[in-house]
Image (cartoon, helix red, strand yellow):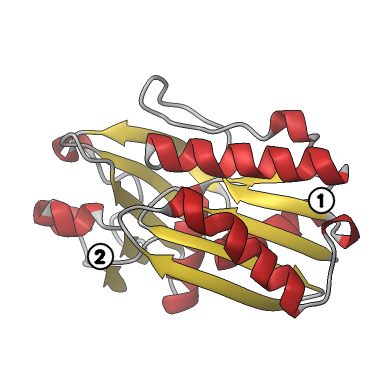
Amino acid sequence: MKILALDTATENCSAALWIDGALQEVLLETARDHANLILGMADQLLADAQLGLRQLDAIAFGRGPGSFTGVRLAAAVTQGLAFSADLPVLPVSNLRALAAQAFAAAPASGFAVCCADARMGEVYHAVYRSDSQLQGAEQVLAPQDVAWTLAADARAVAVGRGFAAYPALVDLAPRGWDATLEQMLPRARQVAVLAAQDYMQGLAVPPSQALPVYLRDKVVTRP
């Protein structure tokens, strides 16, 4: 299985290539220039692997939530590449990818509580179980509206820069956190890992369905 993954939803601009479980990634944290970087990153990975675009099985991307421009960019680039090579696509939630990173850092945790900084006095919030299942909905909320929805003794890891932007969120867990990963951003590496799982489950879709998810105008999304 060969999957190219792209992510530009946050300050992390990254691309990753999954080849039968082996992963290569190119990543740069930058406030701008994602549009000028992402295609070059993808080309570098394919060239290093001596692969052409049409030799891939699918293209994955971080479908949001994240910055409006960044999420739209990843969707548009993925759609263009997929149409040109006649490949299916795999949209992956950036909060789900963030949770996957958290579980890699704190494998004993049963839940990841994600609070990504959404700017404008809000956070992108979601709770994921360690088996990658979304608990409830992905939402955009004011920090004071984020509530603890798990059992009081649940083992959980806090992840996302919303915890750094709004330090009061660190007090959310009644028993404390297994880990607090307040500087972590989603990246293409985890998008690729999750996309490979989704591909095996038959969840790839046509390029026309490479659509961004912004959350600000709707609070409930599919995982």
Residue under the image location 54 percent in, 33 percent down? 212
Q: Does 87 appear above or below 207?
A: below
- Report if residue 77 is visible in the image: yes
Characterize the local packing of mark 2: few (<14), some (14-19) or many (20 or more) Cα atoms within 10 angstroms.
some
Q: Is 139 left or right of 64, judged from the image as shown?
A: left
Return the mark for residue 201. 1
* Viewer-nearest of discs 1 and 2: 2
Asked whether the beta carbons under mark 1 and mark 2 sit within 8 Å of each other, the answer is no
What amino acid is found at the position of numbered circle 2 in the picture?
A: Glu
- Residue hosting label 2: 182
Q: Split into 4 quadrants, where in the image is the C terminus?
A: top right
Chain-order first, disc 1 or disc 2: 2
Tell me which amino acid carries mark 1. Gln
SS class of the residue under badge 1? loop
Crowding near the residue tagged with mark 1, few <14, some 14–19, many ≥20 C-alpha atoms within 10 Å: few
Q: What residue is drawn where x is 13% and y is 51%? A: 166
The image shows residue 221 at horizontal and vertical percentages of: 52, 30
- Secondary structure under tag 2 reads loop
* Residue 193 visible from this viewpoint: no
Residue 125, above or below 190: above
The image position of residue 17, as x and y in percent, is 69, 68
How many discs appear? 2
User: Against 14, is 223 above or below?
Assistant: above
Provide residue 64's location: percent of width, then percent of height.
48, 41
Observer-nearest of 12 and 111: 12
Image quadrant assignment for residue 29: bottom left
Identify the residue at image location x=31%, y=73%: 178
Instruction: Name the residue: 85% across, 66% down.
Output: 1
Q: Tell whether 15 sits left or right of 89.
A: left
Residue 41, x across and y down, in percent: 59, 65
